[in-house]
Amino acid sequence: MCGIVAYIGSRQAYPIIIKGLHRLEYRGYDSAGVALMNGGLKVYKKAGKVADLEAFIGDQDTSGTLGMGHTRWATHGEPNDRNAHPHYSESKNFAIIHNGIIENYNSIKTELKNRGHNFQSDTDTEVLIHLIEELYDNLKVELEEAVRLALNEIVGAYAIVVMSKEDPKKLIAARKGSPVVVGIGKDEFFVASDATPIVEYTKNVAYLNDGELAIMADGKLVVKTIENQVQTPYVQELEMQLEMLEKGGYEHFMLKEIYEQPRSIWDSMRGRIDAKGRRLRLGGVGEYENKFLNAKRVIIVGCGTSWHAGLVGEYLIEDLARIPVEVEYASEFRYRNPIINEEDFVIAISQSGETADTLAAIELAKSKGATIFGICNVVGSSIPRATHAGSYTHAGPEIGVASTKAFTAQVTVLTLLALQLAHKRGTIKESKFHSLLNELESIPAKVEQALKTNDVVKELAANYKDARNFLYLGRGYGFPVALEGALKLKEISYIHAEGYPAAEMKHGPIALIDEQMPVVVIATKHGSYEKVVSNIQEVKARKGIIIAVVTEGDEEVRKVADHVIEIPEVDDVLSPLLSVIPLQLLSYHIAVLRGCNVDQPRNLAKSVTVE
Ligand code: G6P
């Protein structure tokens, strides 16, 4: 959460920073601010979105070739103007932007106050810039040395950028636990929380490692550790294309991303599966394959939508590869003293690759000797770098805060993984293995077909946009999809929604059902179809409204449901990849009709880098 961006070079910094902040706004949108070296060190900041900041700055002089900007998701201190970043030091000669949390800020603040410092905000961040200035003044050291020494006193996570009037041609960035990418141009540098603000200027980037500082001045980049060891930056080429970051004619990123799924699912299996050649190879498993094949247990950790993908993974791996699986919320796992040992194989799932709880769960499992496999979307992010092995989902940048294409890409990779394990462990018949590979290759075309439900779904959205509650039910592979459908609706339309295993409905939620309650049921023709039909009858008997997602041609459910949404026939194992599509569309259209900000729902952020 919180996005940082900075520039040093010969171009005008302000337009680069504002454009970068718009790209990073998915990380937080409580307030925004910029600092520019423009005669002096000027800071402009405002509660609200980047557009509010731009309106506030208006036509003031924003010239200058060195600057930085921040978009905030509030942790310490209300989201108001005062707490917006950048923060000045005591003399206003230094400024900082920060993503992360400084855990020991209170004790440092008390000491600084005792030494006469005055603070303007309630943030943890302001403490750090006061400390940097004090060290700079007292020790008479270079700016980077003052920053380095200050960071040695800090406990917590940070991605920071520091500027100083005392050294007006230098930019310092540092990271620990929160991402920092440095874009390297000709005599110019870009710094950002991810590569999206950088890609249109340069494709050469270096990702800072934890505990590293980047010092940028005079067209040179020096990377050091906070222990003062000079490092050689590892420069890599970005694969991202600029078009991936634009809406491409869609009204919202979320809709664009929903419609991208035929391609993104294909990209997540491209080069890994060849049904004709009867081959499947998830290269990322690499040297850990034997450990995986012989694992006594698989533990899947993740948060939010990634946790839902993990649940699908549990069903897939147990069903196909016959290895026991546990799925855990990363935030619970890390704090509940779990039993983990060297024979465990942990799969960490994360779109952003930066989720703080998932990262901490990985570190915990690693410390107990488990092998960790990451399934992430953002290349070069922290989780892939913290794991032993892993596979990228290759879904391309996901910008809408509500995850859609990342979910189906995660499920695709989990399906490949389960099939590869099953094949090697001999727990699946050769014929079934090949028919599933063939069917997997036909999924993008079937998703295309499932997207054609859009008009039907839009009409339903108009009918039920004012409902106060929604229930989502499913069994087997339909259950995690029900959870995901409910999450999508609450996230972006603020309607209360719950996902439940269809049979569990009788143990509580059934009490809520009346003629006002839309109940979305995954009722595709699979394993417990007949049981789901009975559950539908139970809802109908209490006058609930049934919206059923069914296999095309289904007549039975049509007779009892109020509405049906037909999706193509597919094997049970692959069904989540299709049944989730109309649920994504339903939440999207309801949110649009309710006038909600679909891509930036209130209080949420795409990348949750705080616990
Ligand atoms: C946030 C996002 C969700 C996401 C979750 C986990 O809550 O809004 O869309 O599912 O974090 O994020 P990750 O990047 O680890 O998948």
Image: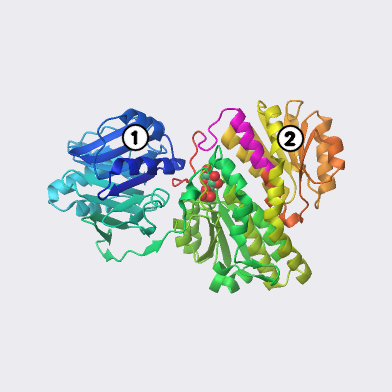
Residue 415 vs 22, above or below: the answer is below
Q: x, y percentage for residue 410?
A: 60, 55
* Identity of the residue drawn at 29% across and 33% down: 44
Q: Which amino acid does label 2 sit on?
A: Val
Q: Which amino acid does label 1 sit on?
A: Ala
How many neighbours does mark 1 have within 10 angstroms: few (below 14), some (14-19), or many (20 or more)? many
Question: Is there any visible trace of residue 1 in the rendered image?
Answer: no
Residue 509 vs 189, above or below: the answer is above
The quadrant in which residue 499 appears is top right
586 or 238: nearer the viewer: 238
Tell me the SS state at disc 2: strand
Which quadrant, please, contains the N terminus?
A: top left
In magenta stretch: residue 69: no
* Identity of the residue drawn at 35% across and 46% down: 5
In magenta stretch: residue 593: yes
Of the numbered discs 1 and 2, the one sitting upstream in the chain is 1
526 or 595: nearer the viewer: 595
Question: Is there any visible trace of residue 503 in the rendered image?
Answer: yes
The quadrant in which residue 544 appears is top right
Q: Give the range drawn in magenta.
A: 582-601
Task: Find the distance from the CA under tag 1 to the CA under tag 2.
Answer: 42 Å
How many neighbours does mark 2 have within 10 angstroms: few (below 14), some (14-19), or many (20 or more)? many
* Residues at discs 1 and 2 in contact (Cβ within 8 Å): no
Q: x, y percentage for residue 325?
A: 65, 59
Tell me the SS state at disc 1: loop
Q: x, y percentage for residue 501?
A: 72, 44
| Count of marks, rendered view | 2
Q: To which residue does mark 1 refer?
A: 84
Q: What main secondary structure does the magenta stretch of the protein show?
A: helix
* Identity of the residue drawn at 69% across and 72% down: 277
Q: To which residue does mark 2 refer?
A: 519
Q: Which residue lies furthest to the front in this view?
A: 249
